[in-house]
Image: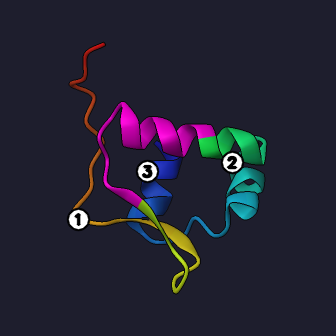
Amino acid sequence: MAIHDLIKTHRTGTPKALSERIGVSERTVYHYIRFMKNELNTPVKWSAIKQSYVYETNGDLNFDWQH
């Protein structure tokens, strides 16, 4: 949820900054972002202009997923 809130407000910063902010490794940030994209179907992308992860569309977390 912390990453989701930061993405919605365009305040994640770089993956390294985000990892420091939420107290995980940079590798874990990449795993979380990949999980959000692939498993939760969130439209997350990196914005070089904003230096933040952003949602391509009005993104929201979708917890209605199945394996």
Disc 3 residue type (three-letter): His
Marks 1 and 3 close (CB-CB < 8 Å)? no
Q: Is residue 45 left or right of residue 55?
A: right
Give me the C-alpha separation between circle 3 and circle 2: 12 Å
Give me the C-alpha separation between circle 1 and circle 3: 13 Å
Which residue lies at the image location 78% right of the left edge and 54% below the top edge? 20
Disc 1 residue type (three-letter): Thr
Residue 12's quadrant in the figure?
bottom right
Q: Is residue 66 left or right of residue 2?
A: left
What residue sits right under mark 3 in the picture?
Answer: 4
Task: Give the residues in magenta.
Answer: 31-44
Disc 2 residue type (three-letter): Ile
x and y percent of residue 63 in the render?
Answer: 27, 28
Task: Please tell me whether mark 3 sits on a helix, a strand or a loop.
Answer: helix
What residue sits right under mark 2 in the picture?
Answer: 22
Marks 1 and 2 close (CB-CB < 8 Å)? no
Which residue lies at the image location 63% right of the left edge and 70% below the top edge? 13
